[in-house]
Image (cartoon, grey):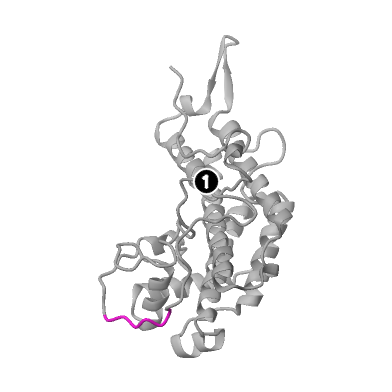
Amino acid sequence: MKKIYLGCLLLLYFTPTAMGQIITDVPENKSNNRFLNDASVISMRPGLSISGFSNEGERGLGLQQILNEAMDSKNSSAYLSVSQILEKAKDPISLNPDVGQIEYTTNILQYLAFETLASLVLEQNGIDSEQSKNTYGLTIGEHSMVIDKLTNAINSLTSNDKLVRKLPGDQPFDDYLNAIRSFNNMARALDLYLATENAYQHYGLDDSSLLTEQEKTDLMNRFRADIDILFNNGLKREYGVGGLFTVTEDHLEAGNRPMKGYFALAYASMSAQTATQEELGHPGRLYFNCPKKSQ
């Protein structure tokens, strides 16, 4: 099957039609502050793969518009994308993958995170998994099952230090560009998970199925440390030149390579959280602004 990415949902632009409003109750678009805090520049969850819970009348589709369009017509681009994502979300993954499997694992994880969020919103609007399949042709799991599957996967990948692709030892990257897809995948998965936390709060649900404070702290500490590793051991890896001076990898390379690396740093940072805004300094800093090259 052709590989698809959750980013395709953000690129689904639409012209308002007489689309049925099946999904009417969705959370407001806001940042996440359960146990930890989003950076001040983050205005809403979800925000990386889709345009919030609702983006009525705007160019990018929010979750409400995506689900309504998908359920309104099986001929719509939204139906095709959602169906493919839900199908991929069911692919098995290793919770302690080899280095070569981590990109695949994180790719499936983002699909599972979308299924988790979508199933919750559907059920809170009176549409269970059976009705979703029989009436609308969308094969989606019961939320109670997929949330457990998602949190178990996140906790296992965190404890096994497999959130992103890196090698063991002092040199985590043979080529840091091989790792950036896993950083982007994980950023989208975490963004959708954080949106799920917001949805639990909106609907007044028991949050015992979500990550505990310690689990979420461990996750974000590990993810922020991985972001620093990409910066320090990837883009800023040092090479000695004739014993006279050192030069960093981003200065040695052609412009497109470090540009991709810095984009991945900034993108991943948008899903990293800290206990306080003061913690946005090193370690675990957020790379929204690419560091300037020294003169």
Which kind of residue does numbered mark 1 sit on? Answer: Ala
Residue indicated by mark 1: 39
Q: Residues in magenta?
A: 18-23
Q: Is residue 295 left or right of residue 239?
A: left
Task: Report whether residue 171 is seen.
Answer: yes
Residue 280 position within the rendered picture, expressed as x and y whole percent measured from the top left: 57, 38
In the rendered image, the quadrant that contains the C terminus is: top left
Q: Is residue 166 left or right of residue 68?
A: right
The rendered magenta stretch, by its main secondary structure, is classed as: loop
Q: Nearer the viewer, residue 20 or 157?
A: 20
Instruction: Identify which residue is drawn at 61% across, 57% down.
Output: 34
Residue 153: within the magenta?
Answer: no
Instruction: Identify which residue is drawn at 54% across, 52% down.
Output: 187
Query: Compared with residue 103, is residue 27 higher up or lower down, i.e. above or below?
Result: below
Task: Report whether residue 107 is seen.
Answer: no
Find numbered disc 1 in the image and state the secondary structure of the residue it sits on. loop
Q: Residues within 10 Å of mark 1 (few under 14, many from 20)?
A: many
Residue 144 position within the rendered picture, expressed as x and y whole percent measured from the top left: 65, 76
Residue 289 position within the rendered picture, expressed as x and y whole percent measured from the top left: 45, 36
Q: Is residue 178 left or right of residue 61?
A: right
Instruction: Identify which residue is drawn at 57% across, 62% down.
Output: 193
Residue 19: within the magenta?
Answer: yes
Residue 165 position within the rendered picture, expressed as x and y whole percent measured from the top left: 61, 47
Instruction: Identify which residue is drawn at 59% across, 69% down.
Output: 200
Residue 128 lies in quadrant:
bottom right
Residue 236 lies in quadrant:
top right
